[in-house]
Amino acid sequence: MKKINKYLDMAIKFCLFTFLFFLLFNASINQILYPFAFGMLFALTWANQKVYLLAPAYLLSGLITEFSLENAIVLLVTIFVLIVPYFIHVLCKKVMRKWEFGIFVVISQTGKIVFEILGGFSPILSVVNVALGVLYLYLAIVIFEALIIRGFSNKLTSLELVSLFVLVMSLCAGFVNLNIENFSFLKLFVSFLILVFAYTSSPILTLLLAITAGVGALIATNNPLYMTPFVLWAMSALMFKNHHRIFMIVGVLCVEVLIGLYFQLYYSFGIIEALPLLISSVVFFFLQKAWLNEVSVVFNLSKDRLAMKNVVNRNREILHQRLGNLAEVFNDMNIIYRNMLKKGMSQEDVKKILNEEICDKICSYCPERNHCHRTFAENTHKVFDELITIAFERGKVNLLDIPSYLTSRCKQTSAILGAVNTLTAQYKKYLTMLTDVDTSKTIIADQLLGISKVIGALSKEVESNVSFDSVRENKILDELTYHNIICIDAVVFEKDIHTDVASLVVRSEDAEKLRIVDYVGKVMGKKMIIFEAFPSMRPNYTVLNLKTAPRFDCLFGIAQKTKSNSIKSGDTYSIIKLDGDKILFAISDGMGSGEKAENISELSLSLIENFYKAGFDNEIILSTVNKLLNLHKEEIFSALDIGVLDLKNGIIDFIKMASPVSFIINENEVKKVESSSLPMGIVSDIKPVVKKVVISGNDFVVIASDGVSDSFEDDEIFKEEIVSIKTKNPQELADQLLEKALSKNKGYAVDDMTILVVKIFES
């Protein structure tokens, strides 16, 4: 059964190819030039149609058109020049390029040219005929790639529409000579196309189709008769486009009757003359709506995409509102947590309470109580306050801290010392616990505030509608098609004042072509970069997202040396890409060297990286990380040197916490960036100082850990050593600078050493 279906399919295709070639053999320009048939033969071969069906169909239809030995030789030469190179490329598994195909088309017509010249035909007209055939070939390839290879699920580009109209024009030039008595196959073909176009495409395309069909008949016969009825059919069909199909059909038939009977544009008009429109109308009426909707995508995709764009902007508006509400929720939670802080009592209040506690505990059962607390009340309370103060400052008190006048008359000095030490120790422990609880609550509050700010920023980002650019979308499709890159859809919109985004759905085999960036950039009028690529929902297609390339780009160089006799380095560096074309580079120098220092620096830098990726601002990030380190009972310190480079505007935010001086070097000057704050984890509350520095093209930024900077006598010598290295390679600069630092200590690393060099240049 499968074999029967296969042979039946081949037979149907053979008949269709034969009929198509027969039409095009009869299609002419002023009955002098016949450039269409051989161009179509090669175009169908390019579109992966079976050569063993095309060749005999071409030969048969050519002989039916003109049965002669001369014509048979011309046909065989054309087929031979097609088949031989075709199978050579197949055997060699080499893809034939379009320009090679064009050369074979020219060679295939040498037989025809020779016979025409021998028969007295103008050589110039022969060459023009071949040239028009090559042009027709390329236009046919364009539309076949769109409809046969890509299918009916993608909008046609401008070039593809032109190719489609040229194809229709050539078919009309053939149909005009194909009549049975007064039955016109041209009217049958054109009326059906006009009804389909009117239903599935725009009014402009429908009118262009009608004019194109009239031009096809005109170039073949020099008779403009058909132009008027075709345009009138199109106009009547368009009038009822938004109504049921039956009204379009009735409108076209009524116009045909008026043209034939009232205006008498035809030589004769009757049932036979009206029959082509009746047949095409019946066929159009019974066409499935699903098929017509599928065809409408080819011409009318913009309507669906307009609805899609409206949905996108509506969803952004809803998202903006919800994110705004969510940001307010997190901000309210931040306020609640901050109001929950205990904050402890003042030192004077604590002394007063502890003073009373000691009196109740020690003096309440003493027989000398009244004497001490009445006669010497002021001195007694003063002594207790002084003892409590000493216990807070030194950790404990001893017998030497009690004044001699008290020891001479008080028999409870040992009990007083024990009570003071015990109560102050208990209070210190309580105060530490209370501080830790408050610090934890502050960290949670900071994170809630940070989340509120991040969500608020996201809400602001989606607040405005996305401005889509349909003009540039169509230009991109045309440009990529011209360069033989299959792109089935393109969306262009403005993300912000600096950034335009183009999202393309291209054939997977074309996604690797590097020139896509250049072609899109040509249309956008600016340099573009691919920032994202992932598989499309449609098989064998890939989504490429391109955006405006930032003004600057950068390269990095890293050089490191672990402290001599130490297994692990306490220095950690990081280079990560942030949203908004920003780059973070940093060095974290943990206290000391070895595994503990490594863990400290890695912990600090990992927290900072993740906070930055999430979109938190500088103050919240560093304050939170500092509090987390400060919660440890052990002393955990870390020096930080952070730079956040904005590639769009060329501004670096430097955040330096107990880190050595950094340098920005260019041809004209050397800028110093110095630190003015303590390391992370020293004190519970810090406010980072952010220094903004504007850079230009070809700047070098050098940051280093103290193991490097301390190797030089002072910052000026450090700067001179950097400037003395003549290289434009950041890695070479980092390596040579490390060698110079080591040479200052005779090759011995007195501390962990890390150098990070950033070369910034205009992209």
Image: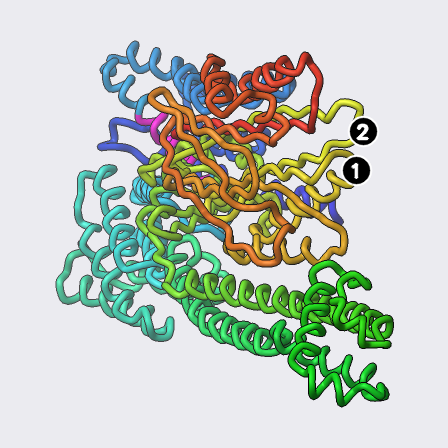
Q: Looking at the image, which is closer to me, 471 or 686?
A: 686
Residue at (49, 51) in percent of width and height = 152
Dot 1 and dot 2 residues touching (CB under 8 Å): yes
Q: Give coordinates of residue 329: x percent, y percent.
A: 54, 76
Q: Which amino acid type is shown beneath numbered disc 2?
A: Ile
Do we see residue 310 in this rendering? yes
Whole-percent x, y for residue 589 in the image = 65, 37
Is 208 a magenta residue?
Answer: no
Q: Residue furthest left?
A: 263
Q: Quadrant of the C terminus?
A: top left
Query: Residue 335 placed where, x, y %?
Result: 54, 75
| Secondary structure predominantly adopted by residues drawn in magenta | helix
Look at 65% across and 43% down and name the residue there: 638
Q: Which mark is residue 76?
A: none
Q: Residues within 10 Å of mark 1 (few under 14, many from 20)?
A: some
Q: On the picture, is 660 further left or further right than 439?
A: left
Label number found at residue 595? 1
Residue type, numbered disc 1: Glu
Task: Choose top left, top right, bottom left or bottom right for residue 132.
Answer: top left
Give the magenta part as a residue range: 132-144
Quick one: 185 or 363, which is closer to the camera? 363
Q: 589 or 265, which is in the foreground?
A: 589
63 with respect to 449 (left or right): left
Residue marked by disc 2 = 567
Q: Is residue 530 left or right of residue 307?
A: right
Choose the circle earlier in sequence order: 1 or 2. Answer: 2
Q: Secondary structure at mark 2?
A: loop
Can you say whether 116 is above or below 592 in the image? above
